[in-house]
């Protein structure tokens, strides 16, 4: 049964409980997905599944109640549980930023085949093909490979006591590739990840990208480690996207700010954080990216929010609650991974706008520096970050010289933003992102940006595991 057939049930329950609490929402979700994992020559996972469930959110005097369920026959019982929980903790005032109620059925546009049109055999054959490419690069040093494929199609029905009755559907695809090379005690890893909300065809014809992961891992075994120090660094757009998401984007999420008064003071509006040509945005409105959608999980329309304008903080990301409590406009950033979790403030597509410095000129005048591209890991802790580059070269007198390995970039995000010396005129959207926060790991996001030149970056050492999955 399609979830749209439950509209009458939800309408009746909304009417019944409308006056019991300040706010009530019911979200039904049907999801269909495929997961495939190959490790070396073995199949670790090969599955298809369908799930149907939902969540109830209630708010009473500022206190929230939440219930999740898999059987609709007892839905009234779950609503009453959520109402009871909200009334137990609510002691203040319910403050939710106003949004216009939405009624209608909305489906994200796609630009080719969606995963439901592709057979499991075809998906498995694609994984075998890429795994073969990884293994064919074997120079005697590749000890293991892995390929993972996942797709999921969501159908969601959202009803609220404020009049929203919204049906949405979309799909998401992701593939990950990894090769591990070893020589004695030295181990190097090459990774590539890609994803799409546009078309299954976006996962085809990736042979060169996949082969590159294995070649980098093997080649890095022969490279010298970088000599640690403080350098002027040029990073490529993929590292820029990782930096703006991890190091700055999370600090722009208003629930983190509201819960941390000290951080809220640091992230105060109209404070300068970067040069006058630095523009940072987040938004689900740009079409066709992995963080794109039409309405968030509270029914707020997708938008584009400018976070930094000419280097100055002018915006932050909100749910309806954080927008209400901070007396700001909701931005459409309340998202949940699936019906098991409540919506929280999350990034969508986050990017630094392109600049006007020709990319070839970014290295000009650097006597001794580093050029880093792609990424293989990283971690953030508040305003501190450490990222590992997938590849790197030394810069001598403005020219690329020897390649080096084990290059990590560390620093304070606010100082690093202030140390941006030039912004390239290139731009690239990285669709490989899966964001983690509050136990909700792997939420699809997009990251983008140009190449950057940054002074006084601490380089060297080894980074930990990836934060975002």
Image (cartoon, rainbow, N blue to C red):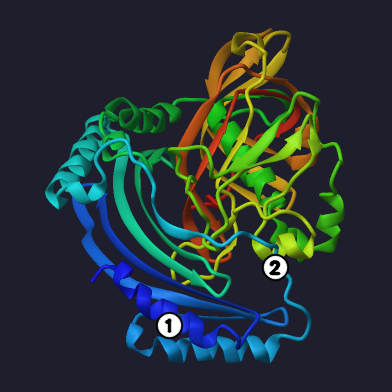
The Cα–Cα distance between marks 1 and 2, rounded to whole angstroms, is 24 Å
Binning the other alpha carbons within 10 Å of mark 2 as few (below 14), some (14 to 19) or many (20 upward) gives some
Is 81 left, or right, of 276 in this rendering? left
Name the quadrant containing residue 364: top right
Name the quadrant containing residue 417: top right
Give the residue at x 72% y 13%.
Answer: 366
Q: Nearer the viewer, residue 351 or 106?
A: 106
Q: Nearer the viewer, residue 339 or 138?
A: 339
Position in image of residue 40 (x %, y %) = 24, 47
> Tag 1, which secondary structure?
helix
Is 260 left, or right, of 351 in this rendering? right
Give the residue at x 44% y 26%.
Answer: 222
Give the residue at x 50% y 82%.
Answer: 15
Q: Nearer the viewer, residue 143 or 176?
A: 176
> Tag 2, which secondary structure?
loop
Q: Nearer the viewer, mark 1 or mark 2?
A: 1
Q: Relative to 72, does residue 198 appear above or below in the rendering?
A: above
Is 127 left, or right, of 173 in this rendering? left
Residue pointed to by mark 2: 96
Mark positioned earlier in the residue sequence (1 or 2) = 1
Give the residue at x 78% y 41%.
Answer: 314
Residue pointed to by mark 1: 12
- The answer to whether the residues at label 1 and label 2 have Cβ atoms under 8 Å apart is no
- Count of marks, rendered view: 2
Position in image of residue 334 (x %, y %) = 58, 59
Q: Which label belongs to residue 359?
A: none
Residue 462 visible? The answer is: no
């Amino acid at each position: 049964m399609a979830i749209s057939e439950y509209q009458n049930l939800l309408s009746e329950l909304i009417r019944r409980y409308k006056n019991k609490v300040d706010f009530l929402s019911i979200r039904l979700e049907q999801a269909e997905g495929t997961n495939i994992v190959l490790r070396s020559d073995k199949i670790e996972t090969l599955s298809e599944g369908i799930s149907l469930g939902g969540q109830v959110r209630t708010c009473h005097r500022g206190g929230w109640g939440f219930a999740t369920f898999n059987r609709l026959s007892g839905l009234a019982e779950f609503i009453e549980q959520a109402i009871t929980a909200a009334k137990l903790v609510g002691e203040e005032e319910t403050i939710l930023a106003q949004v216009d109620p939405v009624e209608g059925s909305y489906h994200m546009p796609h630009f080719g085949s969606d995963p439901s049109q592709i057979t499991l055999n075809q998906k498995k054959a694609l994984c075998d093909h890429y795994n073969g490419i990884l293994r064919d690069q074997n120079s005697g040093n590749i000890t293991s490979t892995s390929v993972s494929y996942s797709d999921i199609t969501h159908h969601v029905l959202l009803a609220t006591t404020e009049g929203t009755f919204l049906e949405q559907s979309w799909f998401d695809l992701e593939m990950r590739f990894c090769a591990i090379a070893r020589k004695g005690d030295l181990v190097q890893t090459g990774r590539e990840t890609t994803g799409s909300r546009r078309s299954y065809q976006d996962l085809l014809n990736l042979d060169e990208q996949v082969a590159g992961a294995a070649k980098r891992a093997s080649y890095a075994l022969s490279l010298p480690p970088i000599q640690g120090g403080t350098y002027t660094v040029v990073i490529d757009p993929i590292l820029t996207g990782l930096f703006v998401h991890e190091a700055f984007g999370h600090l722009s999420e208003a629930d983190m700010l509201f819960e941390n008064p000290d951080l809220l003071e640091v992230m105060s509006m109209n404070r300068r954080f970067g040069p006058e040509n630095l523009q940072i945005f987040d938004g689900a409105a740009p079409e066709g990216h992995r963080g794109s959608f039409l309405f968030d999980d509270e029914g707020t329309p997708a938008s584009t929010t400018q976070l930094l304008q000419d280097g100055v903080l002018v915006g932050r990301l909100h749910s309806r609650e954080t927008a209400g409590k901070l007396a700001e406009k909701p931005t459409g950033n309340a998202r949940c991974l699936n019906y098991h979790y409540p919506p929280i403030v999350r990034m969508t597509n986050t990017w630094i706008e392109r600049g006007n410095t020709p990319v070839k000129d970014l290295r000009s005048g650097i006597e001794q520096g580093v050029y880093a591209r792609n990424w293989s890991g990283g971690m953030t802790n508040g305003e501190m970050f450490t990222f590992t580059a997938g590849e790197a070269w030394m810069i001598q007198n403005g020219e690329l010289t020897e390649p080096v390995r084990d290059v990590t970039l560390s620093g304070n995000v606010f100082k690093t933003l202030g140390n941006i010396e030039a912004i390239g005129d290139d731009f690239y959207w990285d669709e490989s992102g899966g964001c983690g926060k509050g136990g909700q790991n792997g939420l699809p996001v997009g990251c983008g940006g140009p190449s950057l030149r940054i002074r006084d970056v601490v380089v060297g050492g080894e980074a930990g595991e990836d934060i975002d999955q």
